[in-house]
Image (tube, rainbow, N blue to C red):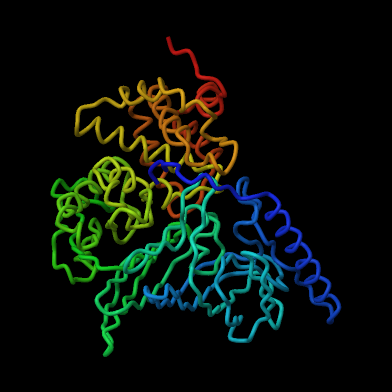
Amino acid sequence: MTQRNRTDRRRRTGAAAGGLAAVLTALALLAGGCTEATGGVRGTPGAAGLRDPYFPKLGNGGYDVSHYALTLAYDPRSGRLDGTAEITARATQDLSAFNLDLAGLTVDGASVDDAPAAVNRAGNELTLRPREEIREGAEFRTTVTYRGVPEPITDADGSEEGWLRTDDGAVAVGEPAGSMTWFPGNHHPSDKAAYELTLTVPAGLEGLSNGVRTARRTAADGRVTTEWHTAEPMASYLATVAIGRYETATGVAKGVGDEVGDEDATGDATGDATGDATGDATGAPDSVPVLTAAERPIADATAPLRGEIPEIIARQARRFGPYPFSSAGAIVTEDGTLGYALETQTRPVFPAAAFDRTTLVHELAHQWFGNSVSPASWRDLWLNEGFATYAEWLYTEEYEHVPARTHFERALAQEANWAFPPASPPTAENLFDPPVYQRGAMVLHMLRETVGEKAFDEILRGWPAKYRHANASTDDFTAYAESVAGRDLDELWDVWLYGEEKPDTR
C-alpha cells in the first residue's frame, strides 16, 4: 500500500472494544458449559480473536482455512449484496463452537458439513455451534448465507476501507480489516487460503477480482457473471472486487518464472478488451497472463502505463526471483472513492491520481513482499512496506540512474521518519505512517551497505523464496539476514530497526 493521506480523524473508542470482548467471553463460557452438560463433549470453543498486537479480536482460533468459495450478487442501485460463503477448514483443536469475522451484514443461515448450525451474533463476531463437535485434525465445510448493504470501515488513521460504493458499482479493499465487510471468514493475515469467487452484476457492468478469470457469461436478462480462481494462498485483506464500467486488456508477462532471465520480457497488455485472463501460459513456465482494467473515462489515459506491467514484473523477477502467482495485472478506478493504492493479490487497485510508475513499482513489488511472504502479525507490516519502498529505490537506481543512497539520505533527513521504530508502531493509527515505509527502506539500505552487494542480492531473492506463500515475522527476517551474512547484525538492528533516536551518521 502507498502511504495514506490522513483526512477524517474519527477514532474508535475503547469502550466499544471492551464491551465486545466481554460479550465474546460470556459466549465462550456459555458454549463451553453447554457442551459439558450435554454428554461429555470434549470440544471447547475456538478463540474469538488471535491477539494481534493492534487488532486483538481480528481473526479466530481453533481452525485453519484452506479454501473460500464466495458467490456474490450486487445491485448498485440499492447497494445490496447477496452472498454465500463456503469455507473449507481444518480444526486445530477439538471444537464445540467457532467464530467468523463479519461486519454489519445479516446472516440468513449457516451449516457445517451440510447440517444446520446455530448462529449467535456479537458485533463483528459470528459464533457458530455445529450439531456435532469437530475433532482436532478434521476437515470441515461451513456455509453461510448473508445479505445487506455493506458499510465501509473508518480506520484509526481516518482512511476508509471495505466495500466502497461508486456511482455505478463498488470497489472492495481490505487492509487491515475491511474484507469482513463483504464476506465472513478468518480475517487475519496469518490464515491464508485459496479462493474461488463467482460474481454477478447488472447488465453493462464488469465484475473483477483476484486471480485468473475462468468464465464469463451473460444471462438472458443481461446480467454478467464472472468466475475467478486464486490458486495460491491469499490473506483475506488482499482479496478485492471491482464493479463498474471497466475496459479490460490482456497480455502475457514473459521471463518471470523459474526460468527468469529471458530478455524478451516486455509482453503485451493491450489485447482484446473482452478476453479472459487465461493468457498463453500453458507450456511456458516462465510466463503469466496479465489482465488490466480501468474505468472507461480513464481507460485511454491509463493504457500506456498499464501496458508496462509485463515489463516491470519481468524486471522485478530478475531481482526478486520468480513471480509468485499464476496471474498479474491492475485495476484503476476514477478518483473520488479510493484514497490510496493497495497491493491486492495479483491485481493491485489504484485510484487514477495514484496510478504512476513509482506507485505501480511499489504495489507490484508487494506481490513478493507482503502477498507471497505475508506478515505474521500486523506489527510486521514494515516487512511489506519497507521492501516495497526499497523496490522503488532499486528501480530508480537501475533504470533512472538515481542511486538508492540518494533516496536513503533524503529519508534520513526527514524528521517524520524518526517518530518511532519501524518494527514497533505505537498504535494501530500509526501502522501506515512514514517510519514503516521510509525508515523500513532505510533498514534495508543499511543492511545492503553492511553485508555487501552479493549477500544483499541473495537476501532479496532468498527471503521471498524461503517463505513463499507463507507468513513471516521480523525475527524470522533478522535471523535469515544473519544466516546469509554469516554474522551477527545486532548493532544494525538495534540502531535502525528498533532504535528510538536518529543516529548521528556524520
Picture quadrant of residue 129: bottom right
Judged from this view, the residue extending furthest toward the right is 37
> What is the count of numbered marks?
0
- The front one of 50 and 502 is 502
Q: Is residue 183 above or below residue 253?
A: below
Q: Is residue 385 above or below residue 114?
A: above
Residue at x 51%, y 77% (from the top left corner): 147
Picture quadrant of residue 428: top right
Q: Is residue 127 above or below residue 7?
A: below
Judged from this view, the residue extending furthest toward the bottom is 220
- The front one of 237 and 317 is 237
Residue at x 39%, y 25% (from the top left corner): 411
Can see residue 234? Answer: yes
Residue at x 23%, y 58% (from the top left corner): 287
Picture quadrant of residue 484: top left
The quarter of the picture where the C terminus appears is top left
Give how far across and how far down residue 182 sits, in percent.
48, 68
Give how far across and how far down residue 71 sits, in percent.
43, 77
Q: Is residue 407 above or below residue 431?
A: above
Judged from this view, the residue extending furthest toward the top is 506
Give how far across and how far down residue 74 sits, in percent.
39, 75
Give how far across and how far down residue 416 sits, in percent.
46, 27
Side (left or right) of 361 relative to 495: left
Side (left or right) of 126 relative to 492: right
- The front one of 271 and 485 is 271
Side (left or right) of 301 relative to 326: left
Residue at x 40%, y 78% (from the top left corner): 73
- The front one of 119 and 6 is 6
Can see residue 488? Answer: no
